[in-house]
Image (tube, rainbow, N blue to C red):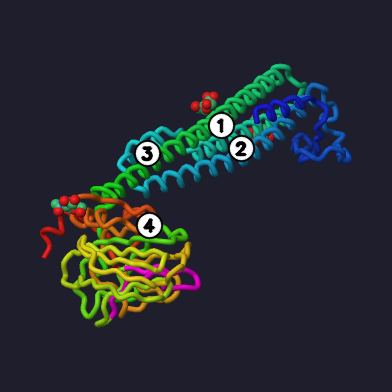
Amino acid sequence: MIALFVALLLVLAPGSGKVARASGAKGNRFLCTAVPTGTDFNCPVDTNSRVQNTSPQEEELRNTIIQLREIILQQKETIVSQQGTIKELNSKLVRCEADAKSRGNARRKDYSKNTMGDLPRDPAETVQQLGKTMQSLKDRLENLEQLHANTSSGPFPNELKDLLKHRLSDLEGQLLTRVAELEEEKSQLYNETAAHRQRTENTLKTLLDRITELEKSNSAFKSPEDFKVSLPLRTNYLYGRIKKSLPEMYAFTVCMWLKSSASPGIGTPFSYGVPGQANEIVLIEWGNNPIELLVNDKVAQLPLSVSDGRWHHICITWTTRDGFWEAYQDGERLGTGENLAPWHPIKPGGVIILGQEQDIVGGRFDATQAFVGELSHFNMWDRVLRPIDISAMANCSAYMPGNVVPWVDANVEVFGSATKAALEICEDRLFDS
Ligand SMILES: *[C@@H]1O[C@H](CO)[C@@H](O)[C@H](O)[C@H]1NC(C)=O
Ligand SMILES: *[C@@H]1O[C@H](CO)[C@@H](O)[C@H](O)[C@H]1NC(C)=O
Ligand SMILES: *[C@@H]1O[C@H](CO)[C@@H](O)[C@H](O)[C@H]1NC(C)=O
């Protein structure tokens, strides 16, 4: 912008401006007006006036004044455009500040002091000030013109010419200073904007870190497996979902701790549905029927009894070879059988739901088949566990996470008003009634 201004000053040479002279009353008063270059310069001239004797110096000075006026007009336009830029920057700053404030963090005080407090004074004010200065320069110039007109009737005095020249360079100097000041303010605004954004980002990051920390300390259990899922109501919308699916399997063991006093029947502690077979694996106690294990929609009745409102550890093993299964309760094997979906491979990629029976994969639950109670340590392996491993888990002398589905907080989602809560099953079940 300074460069532009200097370039404009460089064309400040005599001869290129045109002056239209209107002969006023008595012919000794002139109004100077800029007219487009190339305009026919055919002025009516009062022959009685001494104006026709205009000296070359006088003409030069007049042209200089015209040029300066043009420059001032140009300058005003530039200032207006600067004003736009500054306004835009300013509104961005204000927006940033409002955002930061609405986050209401602890560092807010500092922050607003360090930004808005240290900002150069209101740029809009500066521009307004600049506009006033330009107006006063213009006024002074008009005075000079007037003076010129008043005195041109006599021989053109050298002192006046010198005075005008002096004033003109004075004006140039003032303009340049103003422009430089404006540039400086603009640069400060840019710097402030960048610094402000940096501070906002830092504040945001700190906030985010704190929230993450809080979330961790709020939801993390003593260790990731020390929690239970509670399904307190018989509905078709309370359930838990295991985020992991199953691989194709030729055998499995599923174990869990559960507690229910629902009657008749505890409902469906878990179900695994795959596309095309909603009952790929289901454990269900429905109505007055015994607990049943479904594999590929084939049914085996299990000799388990857990609906006394106490915590029980149950495990079920199954292998595709002859469809052989075992049922354990509290570490004891209470029953075995075979021919349950023999030679069927468990299909992969389905959905494991805790507490509901699926009629389609992941949905269409039935309230009458819902599990009511609490579940913990739901683990699955892709092999048949040994009896000694199962009894060690049941008497809390060992804990083994499942190799295909381990019971970990991050792996279990709850829906409806189902909840996850801290539970150290091996501590708590002893005091349970
Ligand atoms: C020029 O003359 C007019 C009257 O002819 C007067 O009103 C005006 O004040 C004079 N201007 C200056 C700058 O002397
Ligand atoms: C703005 O930042 C630039 C680059 O960091 C620096 O050269 C300039 O002096 C700064 N301006 C102000 C007004 O602080
Ligand atoms: C727990 O079960 C394991 C495996 O059956 C057995 O070795 C251990 O003695 C049992 N511990 C208690 C305290 O019953």
Tag 1 residue: 182
Q: Residue at x 34, y 60 (%)?
A: 253
**Residue 172 x, y percent position in the rendering:** 65, 25
Task: Report how far apart the C-alphas of labels 2 and 1 lie in the structure.
Answer: 9 Å
Asked which quadrant contains residue 13, the reply is top right
Residue 114 circle label: none
Q: Position of residue 206 (x, y in %)?
A: 36, 40
Marked residue nearer the N-terminal end (3 or 1): 3
The kind of secondary structure element at disc 1 is helix
Q: Do the CB atoms of the residues marked 2 and 1 lie less than 8 Å apart?
A: yes
Q: Point out the image quarter for the C terminus.
A: bottom left
Mark 4 near mark 1, Cβ–Cβ under 8 Å?
no
- 247 or 178: nearer the viewer: 247
Above or below — where is 286 with respect to 315? below
Across and down, in percent, residue 9 comes to 72, 26
Q: Is residue 392 visible?
A: yes
- Callout 4: SS: loop
Circle number at residue 383: 4
Is 284 a magenta residue? yes
Cα distance in 3D space between marks 4 and 2: 81 Å
What is the CA distance from the residue labelled 4 to the residue labelled 3? Answer: 63 Å
The quadrant in which residue 365 appears is bottom left
Please name whichever residue, 24 or 169, is drawn nearer the observer in this view of the structure. Answer: 169
Residue type at numbered disc 1 = Leu
Q: Which residues are magenta?
A: 270-286
- Residue at mark 4 to residue at mark 1: CA–CA distance: 78 Å
In the picture of the structure, the residue carrying the numbered disc 3 is 112
> From where the camera sits, is residue 396 visible?
no
* Residue located beneath label 2 in the image: 79
